[in-house]
Image (cartoon, helix red, strand yellow):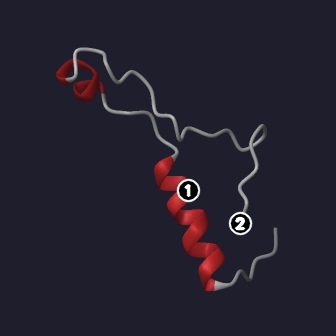
Amino acid sequence: MSKHKSLGKKLRLGKALKRNSPIPAWVIIKTQAEIRFNPLRRNWRRNNLKV
């Protein structure tokens, strides 16, 4: 990817990076395992962002 990105693209990539993390363990405990995983989880090789 090019070094010089537009601001909008850079912000969207940054948001996707922050969103791509597992949920904390305390959330699983607090919700009594109703919420077990992050549905927004993404792998860079398998899933493409539509940016």
**Above or below — where is 1 with respect to 39?**
below
**Above or below — where is 1 with respect to 31?**
below
Q: Is 15 placed left or right of 51 in the picture?
A: left
Q: Secondary structure at mark 2?
A: loop
Numbered tag placed on residue 27 in the rendering: none
Quadrant holding the C terminus: bottom right
Residue at label 1? 16
Residue at label 2? 51
Quadrant holding the N terminus: bottom right
Q: Is 26 placed left or right of 48 in the picture?
A: left
Specify the farthest residue to the front: 34
Asked which quadrant contains residue 27, the reply is: top left
Asked which quadrant contains residue 16, the reply is: bottom right
Specify the farthest residue to the top: 32
CB of mark 2 within 8 Å of CB of mark 1? yes
* Residue type pointed to by label 1: Ala
| Image location of residue 36, percent across then percent down | 39, 21
Which of the marked residues, 2 or 1, is nearer the chain's N terminus? 1
